[in-house]
Image (cartoon, rainbow, N blue to C red):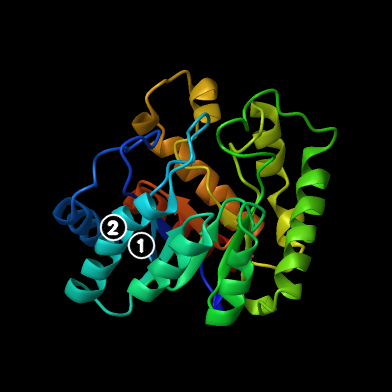
Amino acid sequence: MFSQVNKPLIMGILNITPDSFSDGGKYTGIHAALQQVKRMLAEGADIIDIGGESTRPGSDSVAAAEQQRRVVPVITAIRQQLKSDILISIDTTSSAVAKAALAAGANIINDVSAGLHDQAILALAAQTDVPIILMHSQSAPKTMQENPYYNDVVREVIEALKKRIDAALKAGIKKEHIAIDPGIGFGKRKQDNLDLLAHLDALVALGFPVLLGASRKRFMGTLCDVSEPSELVTATAVTTALGVLAGVRIFRVHDVKENRQAADVAWAIRRSR
């Protein structure tokens, strides 16, 4: 699937959680979730990323059974009531949650631990022949922002992702079913995030589609002197445009319309080179 991407894809975020950093509690009901999915699709989303566990800094883990209770009815409702060809990714580190979500109709796994939290998730992706997104994080969300440190963040993130790619390939996942994510804001300092954004081309050079998830992240608020995540729509769109020019292919965002526009314009400029 990922190898066939020939334009930037916009992944719309749907958090079925009470405590996500930007939109926690907004879409916990099926009706509200479906309305948000409809809106994101109308604004140009290519993928809907559904998660039942917040991964904001300092967040506690959520039991697999509770994650399933949150996400499975929503995925089922999307498949029953909306277009059947919608791409749905399940945002989880649990193989049990991923398995239940795939059975309900999801067709991509998005794992912020890259298989480190639950190695069975790699085997599941191989057995079900679905794409998986492997993200870098220095540790679990609960502790990831407790004094993270790198000597060379770009090199170290690339080396860590190479190891997870190797693990995925050894588990039987097809190369064309692997995408990677540098994990902006996950166990990173402000300068680490900036360094990764400045060198996205080095990640692209690994030969796997790159996903960028900078949407409304706190480090941009410190640069823009704002504290409300919803005020970082323009800042996020800037990272999307820069990412397209660097070769990034997937953008995980809260604000679909603005980032769709940024991606489309940047893509037209890139194609004109």
Q: Is residue 11 above or below residue 148?
A: below
Examine the rendering and report whether any part of residue 85 can be seen: yes
Q: Is residue 5 above or below residue 65?
A: below
Label 2 and label 1: CA atoms lie apart by 5 Å
> Do the residues under discs 2 and 1 have CB atoms within 8 angstroms?
yes
Residue drawn at x 47%, y 63% as measured from the top left:
96
Residue 45's tag is 1
State the residue position of label 2: 40
**Residue 111 image offset from top left, x and y in percent:** 56, 57
Q: Is residue 241 above or below residue 227?
A: below
Tell me the element at label 2: helix
Examine the rendering and report whether any part of residue 272 can be seen: no
Tell me the element at label 1: loop
**Residue positioned most to the left:** 31
Instruction: Say which amino acid is labelled 1.
Output: Ala
**Residue 31 image offset from top left, x and y in percent:** 14, 55
For marks 2 and 1 on the same chain, the one whose residue lies earlier in the sequence: 2
Residue 61's tag is none
Residue drawn at x 48%, y 33% as measured from the top left:
59
**Residue 228 relative to residue 266: left or right:** left
**Residue positioned most to the top:** 225
**Residue 164 image offset from top left, x and y in percent:** 73, 60
Residue drawn at x 57%, y 67% as measured from the top left:
132
Mark 2 is surrounded, within 10 Å at the Cα level, by few (under 14), some (14 to 19) or many (20 or more) other residues, namely many
Q: Is residue 103 above or below residue 230?
A: below
Q: Quadrant of residue 239?
A: top right
Question: For the image shown, how many numbered marks are present on the structure?
Answer: 2
**Residue 26 relative to residue 133: left or right:** left
Towards the viewer: 47 or 99: 99
Instruction: Say which amino acid is labelled 2.
Output: Met
Towards the viewer: 192 or 69: 69
